[in-house]
Amino acid sequence: MSIHVGIAAYGEGIQLLRLKYGDKEMWNGSLTAAETFSIAQRSLFGGLKKEGGVAGLAWWLPGDSSQTVPETLAKKLGLTTATCPGFRGLSSVFFTGNRGIDTSDGTVWGDIISQLRSVIGTKGFYWGANNPYLRKISARVRRPSIGLDPAIALIRMPDDSKNRPQYASNPSHMIYECLVNKHWGMGENPDLIDKTTFEACAQTLYNEQFGLNMIWTRQSEIGKFIGEILDHVQGALFVHPATGKHTLKLLRADYDVDQVPEINPSNATLSTFRRKAWGEISNEVVVTMSNSESGQEATVSAQDLAGIAAEGGVISSSKNYYGVTSQPLAIKLAERDLAAAVNPIATCDATVDRTFWDTVTSDVVTLSWPEYNIERIVFRVAEVTKNRSTVTLSLYEDIFGLDLASYLSPGDTEWINPSQPPTPASYYQMGTLPAYMMTSALELDSPADFVYPEVISSVVVGPDSDDDVSYNLVTYAADVNGTVSQTDIGTKSYKGTWAFLDALPAEATTTLADLPGLRGLVPEAGDFILIGTGPDEQTELCTVQSVTDGTYVLNRGMLDTVPQDWPIGSRAFVIPAMSTAEQNQAIGRRKSRPLRAASGERREGVARPEFPACGVGDFCEGFSQPFGRGFERDGSYRRSSREC
């Protein structure tokens, strides 16, 4: 049976990548121009003894403005090339048999094969046997959005399980084309769009490897589709009052707190100030994504274990980011949303004077209000209402202004090596949190509020290869019958790690020209660096004071640690400012945390390997007994110690 299948509206550069019949792939490749190709998979569904397979010819018709239907296909419609519609503007595939059709490639063998097919081939396309129903026919196509810089219109994503390259569209390009396209978009005049802001956002998203795979249908409003893209990337699209042009802005930590305007009692009145209570906070975020190979939904989760301990259980929320097809990106979005959901964010309405006339949605301001003991807290604008002589701003506390809620720009995740099976985690450190981090994690006023001798354990794991994407943290739990089994407590992303190639002396400040062999997160100013593995007294905490042109300045011996002499090969871990803590454990207990790794490779029927437990010694009381600093008068250091 011959069938003409419509796929999508034509767009410049559209490519046909794969064809599926039911849930089986019957062809894969890459075609841009119109072309005819043969499909011969007669055993796709078990052969003649079961449900047959597929066989015949497929005619790829991309739908460009000069397209005409070949004479062979026109005859099947009872027309000629001159009288048959060209199906321009519509990308489609025409499935036919190969009887009586010349498919020669011009070679001698090609002519012989073509003649044989034309005599013994099928008249229509062979769609299987022993099944009265036609399965779903689907196609995978790719088209870059046009209008902005074409070099960053497509973003390289991790390869699939067959090591085939995967790409996704730049969200900024997608929004721009939705606005200006005159055939299916909003048909906006490009002169009324601030193209500079769109190009800047496109570059940021390209650097973040933030690509989306999405389909728009005419049944849905184009404005709603743009809103879904903005929800994925956490952005805002608005008409700027100063320019009158459509402006795109991403919600990122791209501002200088000292340069943003301040709202205080001298220029505003404040109303409806409130902060979320613990009962309104979620401590788990489940993100739904799309599997690019199967087309089915998949989920990843992120948990704040300190929040779970504080609230006495898991309070989950979910987000559907169906345009995301990369698991590493889905994990980052889950952690991004978790940072906003787990913190008791403050909200308020501020009525300000007309000096804020050009304030727009997503702008950043600082709030200083003595009545609420607030001094220069960073807020972001959710809504702007202009009155006769005042402006009302609806504000919410910005997560990038919170000490424990800022997160890193994704590092360089360009795919280089083919996918590898998961391997045991080799680089990890498990210990106890210092009092400062412990207090911040549980939103306490001071370390004295924590009940002695409870501590919070911390887990830091670094990737063994560039292909590692995540690991599952597992604990042991007993059921009602006393049977002990492993319980999965969340999927985590790897932290950055490297080993020193030179010895590191004990000093107050250290400058590193590079981080040799760094894998995972790249440190930024404000992050912590954990040096050493083993018991707490054999580790050191540093902070990244500044990063300039690849040079890192570290403040050594922070919190309850002191600077130490580190030999060549010492391991270091990057701990971003936004991190989650492990559950509470009493002093003197031994705990095991098995780590189950996952890489970019996904194969049916292959179980994830289970790795030996990471043994943790007795947790020490260091959080309540910080190191004595032990400074000498001449400025040198004296190593102090503590019992554990």
Image (cartoon, helix red, strand yellow):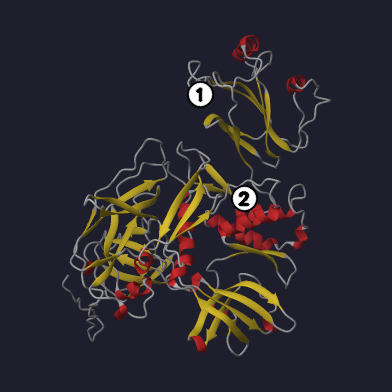
The reply to whether residue 476 is visible in this rendering is yes
* Secondary structure type for disc 1: loop
Above or below 230: residue 539: below
Q: Residues within 10 Å of mark 1 (few under 14, many from 20)?
A: some
Residue lying farthest to the left in this orientation = 643
Residue lying farthest to the right in this orientation = 83
Residue beneath disc 1: 44
- Nearest to the eye among marks 2 and 1: give it: 1
Q: Residue at x 39, y 65 (%)?
A: 579
Above or below 30: residue 623: below
Left-right relation of 168 to 547? right
Left-right relation of 475 to 443? left
Write down the quadrant of residue 515 in the picture.
bottom left
Left-right relation of 186 to 141? right
Quarter occupied by the N terminus: top right
Q: Residues within 10 Å of mark 2 (few under 14, many from 20)?
A: many
> Where residue 214 sits in the image (x, y, percent)?
60, 47
> Where residue 642 sits in the image (x, y, percent)?
18, 74
> Where residue 431 sits in the image (x, y, percent)?
26, 64
> Where residue 594 sits in the image (x, y, percent)?
27, 52
Residue type at tag 2: Ala
Above or below 318: residue 98: above
Depth check: 519 or 396 in front? 396
The mark found on residue 332 in the picture is none
The reply to whether residue 525 is visible in this rendering is no
Write down the quadrant of residue 536 in the picture.
bottom left
Residue type at tag 1: Leu
Residue beneath disc 2: 153
Depth check: 288 or 153 in front? 288
Disc 2 to disc 1, C-alpha distance = 36 Å
Tell me how many marks there are: 2
**Reading the chain from its start, which is encountered first: label 2 or label 1?**
1
